[in-house]
Amino acid sequence: MTHAPTSTGLTFEVDTREDPTPSERIAQVLANPGFGKTFTDHMVVATWRADAGWHGARVQPYGPFSLDPAAAVLHYAQEIFEGMKAYRHADGSIWTFRPEANAARFARSARRLALPELPEAYFIESLRQLVAVDQEWVPAGDAGEKSLYLRPFMFASEAFLGVRPALEVTYAVIASPAGPYFPRGLEPVSLWISTHYARAGEGGTGAAKCGGNYASSLAGQLEGIQHGCDQAVFLDSSTQTYIEELGGMNLFFVMRDGRIVTPELTGTILEGVTRSSILALAKELDLEPEERRIPIQEWKDGAASGEIVEIFACGTAAVVTPVGELRWDGGSVDHRRQGHEDRYAATIRRRLLDIQYGRVEDTFGWLTRLV
């Protein structure tokens, strides 16, 4: 075991596997990684205790946690997570995209779930430490849309039965080689309007990236699949009138008059890093960004009339995915039948990927080097 002091003043113990995955096997995985199927050789783990703060940061062999059956997360769902990617550039260096934004959202999620906040420097250094050890798992930059998906997460590991914030918390980062989230590429997805289920409610945890929000979206997603759709779109829980988001992606609408509109953040919608990046990129495409509440009826009418010329969803995993047909109980509409193309979706997607893979200049300062 070695100690890895960092420029941030943090120290990570590094305990590498004695039997690392052979290079030949890694190459096989990277040839067709899928998404979230195979994990790298190591993970980062650290502990927080109320009487000691953050301590024990280390890189260790990937493996199961030993959890007491009374661990608070198993009973009270006190946990949060993030999702981001590491990209290999043409010169072999490895970078990630806007990690400070993920760190800030991780801190906001922690506050909402009554978990301890992890300092930004600690968050970013944990990514750097893991990728440095497992850098062979990062696909080549010219290997198509492939990357190393990074999953930082935090959960209440204290063993107790009682409804209060945990006094012991575990932080970890795992990594998984990833190909395109939607293997079919830039093909439009179909969406089902979920009216029986809501993803989040006012005053709830909708703006936090926690597992409960995703669990609550699954029944709506299954309902959509049963109606022949790829995903479900959720409305506000109080009036079932306004568009919010999909189970794990934000939505954008390109209007005929040059506006690009997305649902405003009301406390029930997750503030996506890709979402905020698209708002920043809009001016480059002569689009006027607009954040406001969008009635679902506006979607139905605008898609039918041609007022809405493009619709797409976005997120870290999928980047940008066009939306085609919208279905609901008793009807459907597909704006693409009007002859519209997904021009803006394709352009924005390509622009983001070019920045992430270092193919164009990063004029926004969004990239952070890991290795």
Image: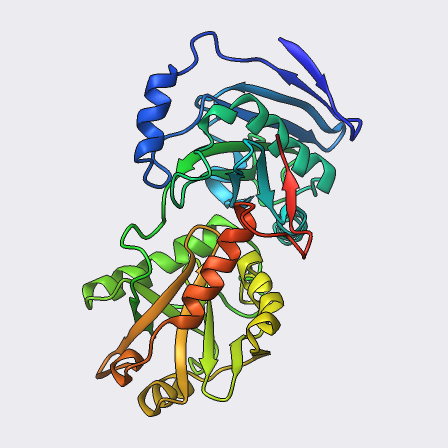
Is residue 268 positioned above or below 259 on the image? above
Seen at 78% across and 31% down, the residue is 8
Q: Quadrant of residue 339?
A: bottom left
Look at the image and tell me in which quarter the C terminus lies: top right
Look at the image and tell me in which quarter the N terminus lies: top right
Q: How is the image coloured?
A: rainbow
Q: Quadrant of residue 122?
A: top right
Seen at 56% across and 52% down, the residue is 355
Q: Nearer the viewer, residue 77 or 325?
A: 325
Q: How many marks?
A: 0
Residue 74, given in percent of the width and then of the height, sits at: 46, 38
Residue 221, given in percent of the width and then of the height, sits at: 31, 61
Specify whether residue 119 is in view.
no
Seen at 59% across and 61% down, the residue is 277
Is residue 331 positioned above or below 97 on the image? below
In the picture provided, is 207 more to the left or to the right than 324? right
Seen at 31% across and 63% down, the residue is 231
Q: Nearer the viewer, residue 214 or 255?
A: 255
Specify whether residue 347 is in view.
yes
Is residue 332 positioned above or below 127 on the image? below
Q: Nearer the viewer, residue 347 or 183?
A: 347
In the picture provided, is 124 more to the left or to the right than 342? right
Residue 313, given in percent of the width and then of the height, sits at: 42, 65
Is residue 311 positioned above or below 181 on the image? below
Residue 272, given in percent of the width and then of the height, sits at: 55, 59
